[in-house]
Image (cartoon, rainbow, N blue to C red):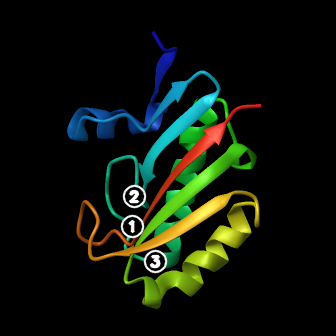
Amino acid sequence: MTDRQRIIPPSMHTIVERAGYVPAVKVGKTLYCAGQVGRTPELAIIEDPEAQFIAAWANLRQVLEEGGCSFEEVVDMTTYHVNMHEHMAVFREVKNRLFPRGHCAWTTIGVSELAHPGLLVEIKCVAVQR
């Protein structure tokens, strides 16, 4: 039997109730984070691209911290982008401001849509606690 723990920051109970998934699952020292997007705790999508990207990173930080990790412990990250060609420069600028550069494996994927209209990015990662 694996040591499996559901990770749910207090501000994310609404998403668990409404969508039926948890923001992360921790197995041993490894934290598997579901994709985080730029919306409020009330699940309102933030319209301004830069503000949406900042919120997505803030939501990811909350999940990591609730699981006992930080950005520095992320080992693998995948980002999914709607209109990647239009928003990538702003996303990269926000990422470089908030997330350690050259720190983990990173894959970017352009997609036609995410779970809800208006979402521009989803950030999914795996972290290993020190």
Q: Nearer the viewer, residue 54 or 126?
A: 126
Q: Position of residue 121 (x, y in %)?
A: 42, 68
Pointer 3 with pointer 1, Cβ within 8 A: no
Q: Quadrant of residue 111?
A: bottom left
Quadrant, the N terminus: top left
Pointer 1 with pointer 2, Cβ within 8 A: yes
Residue in view at x 58 percent, y 86 percent: 89
Q: Which of the two discs, 1 and 2, labels the residue nearer the N terminus?
A: 2
Q: Residue furthest front?
A: 1
What amino acid type should be assigned to the residue bearing mark 1? Ile
The residue at which mark 1 appears reads as 46
What amino acid type should be assigned to the residue bearing mark 2? Arg
Secondary structure under tag 3 reads: helix
Q: Residue furthest bottom?
A: 86
Position above or below: 122 against 19: below
Q: In this rendering, would 5 be left or right of 45?
A: right
Q: Tell me how far mark 1 sits from mark 2, CA to CA.
A: 5 Å
Residue in view at x 37 percent, y 34 percent: 22
Q: In this rendering, would 52 be left or right of 97?
A: left
The residue at which mark 2 appears reads as 39
Q: Tell me how far mark 3 sits from mark 1, CA to CA.
A: 8 Å
Q: In this rendering, would 67 be left or right of 17?
A: right
Secondary structure under tag 2 reads: loop
Secondary structure under tag 1 reads: loop
